[in-house]
Image (tube, helix red, strand yellow):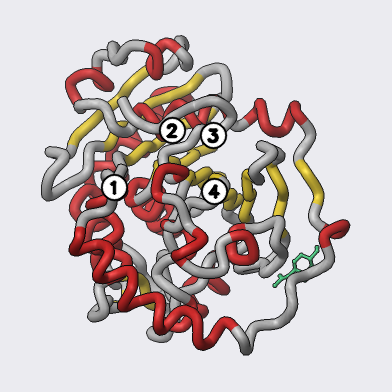
């Protein structure tokens, strides 16, 4: 997909800022310390990859669990609720996976051409998370205001559906997932659901996740008993945006898919090894928009 002239202009503007601070960063970590996941570990992500992909399907299709190959890939799934309009509010669905024994929440992402302006806007605003949804957080914790706004629009409907599903199926595990913007919403959902349903065990599995919040946000998420995995593909540039120089930081839990399709577990936040996205895609010129949608273990994102 060819980037529009507008995106190109933003990219070049941003590149000037990106290249300068790169020199001050520590040298890439040693290769041998970063381990590849075993095939069985990669395979274990497949249900979530399909759920993230299914997030792009219309709410009527996910509520009926009739969306073709993506729905058929998780055949035992029992939908509980769905919503969103795919415009102001991203599509979402909530249901129960009896095979995993988990309630699953998924959010729709966006086209690469739509998310890049959100990430490269020179006026990106960070804001505190709404204290009604996220009670008790330190005032230093901030997130991308666009992502926070998107999460807020579906928050109460998602919470109510998750509570319904947890009690109906008598389980306590919840996994949130999504791709791109959907992954950003799902990460905020994981934090939100952990605060709202403290007895639940929360897991997040995201794909092509952009940076969602500031250093305090990343540290806060890392300190919670929330299992976080964010998987990024090859030279996708979305996960390196917004730039660290703008005060955005990834949480720990990165898995980077290399050019040889190995899934590398990258310890720490924004690991600078060239086996991880920050080292592999040091600036946007090394990035490739077409890697954003996948494939993730053979699965391309989209309904
Ligand atoms: C990157 O991973 C290596 C290998 O495990 C580790 O030694 C290093 O501290 C990590 N870097 C960061 C920035 O977390």
Query: 110 or 21: which is nearer to us?
Result: 21
Left or right, residue 28 beside residue 150: right
Alpha-carbon neighbours of circle 1 within 10 Å: few (<14), some, or many (≥20)?
A: few
Helix or strand or loop: what does disc 2 sit on? strand
Q: Quadrant of the C terminus?
A: top left
Q: Nearer the viewer, residue 152 or 240?
A: 240
| Contact flag, marks 3 and 4 (Cβ < 8 Å) | no
Q: Which residue is mark 1?
A: 2
User: Upstream in the sequence, badge 1 or badge 4?
Assistant: 1
Quarter occupied by the N terminus: top left
Q: Nearer the viewer, mark 3 or mark 2?
A: 3
Whether residues under marks 3 and 1 lie with C-beta atoms below 8 angstroms apart, the answer is no
Q: Residue at x 62, y 55 (%)?
A: 254
Query: In whole angstroms, how far apart are the C-alphas of marks 2 and 4?
Result: 20 Å
Find numbered disc 3 in the image and state the secondary structure of the residue it sits on.
loop
Residue shown at 84%/66% (left/top)? Answer: 30
N-terminal-most mark, 2 or 1 = 1
What is the secondary structure assignment of the residue under circle 4? strand
- Residue 119 lies, in percent from the top left, at 32, 66
Residue bearing mark 4: 232
Q: Earlier in the sequence, mark 3 or mark 1?
A: 1
For the residues marked 3 and 4, what is the alpha-carbon distance in whole angstroms?
A: 8 Å
Viewer-side residue, 143 vs 140: 143
Question: Does label 3 or label 2 sit earlier along the sequence?
Answer: 2
Pointer 3 residue: 296
Q: Image quadrant of ligand 1?
A: bottom right
Mark 1, mark 4: which one is toward the viewer? 1
Residue 265 in percent (x, y) is at 72, 50
What label sits on residue 104 in the rendered view? 2
User: Residue placed at 64% from the left, 65% from the top?
Assistant: 279
> Alpha carbon of mark 3 to alpha carbon of mark 1: how far?
22 Å
């Amino acid at each position: 997909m060819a980037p529009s002239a507008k995106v190109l202009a933003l990219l070049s503007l941003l590149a000037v800022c990106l290249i300068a601070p790169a020199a001050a960063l520590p040298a890439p970590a040693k290769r041998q310390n970063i381990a590849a996941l075993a095939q069985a570990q990669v395979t274990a992500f497949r249900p979530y990859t399909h759920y993230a992909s299914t997030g792009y399907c219309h709410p009527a299709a996910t509520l009926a669990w009739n969306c073709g190959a993506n729905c058929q890939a998780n055949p035992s799934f029992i939908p509980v609720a769905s919503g969103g309009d795919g415009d102001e509010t991203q599509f979402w669905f909530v249901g129960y996976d009896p095979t995993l024994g988990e309630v699953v929440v998924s959010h729709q992402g966006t086209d690469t051409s739509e998310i890049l302006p959100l990430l490269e806007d020179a006026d990106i605003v960070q804001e505190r998370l709404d204290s009604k949804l996220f009670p008790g957080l330190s005032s230093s914790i901030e997130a991308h205001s666009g992502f926070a706004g998107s999460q807020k629009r579906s928050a109460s409907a998602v919470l109510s559906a998750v509570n319904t599903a947890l009690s109906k199926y008598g389980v306590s595990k919840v996994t949130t997932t999504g791709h791109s913007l959907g992954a950003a919403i799902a990460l905020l959902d994981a934090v939100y659901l952990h605060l709202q349903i403290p007895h639940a065990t929360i897991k997040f599995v995201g794909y092509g996740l952009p940076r969602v919040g500031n250093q305090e946000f990343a540290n806060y998420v890392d300190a919670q008993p929330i299992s976080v995995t964010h998987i990024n593909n090859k030279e996708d540039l979305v996960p390196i945006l917004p730039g660290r120089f703008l005060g955005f930081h990834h949480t720990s839990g990165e898995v980077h898919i290399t050019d040889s399709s190995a899934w590398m577990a990258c310890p720490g936040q924004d690991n600078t090894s060239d086996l991880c996205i920050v080292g592999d895609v040091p600036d946007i010129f090394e990035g490739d928009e077409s890697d954003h949608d996948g494939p993730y273990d053979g699965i391309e994102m989209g309904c």
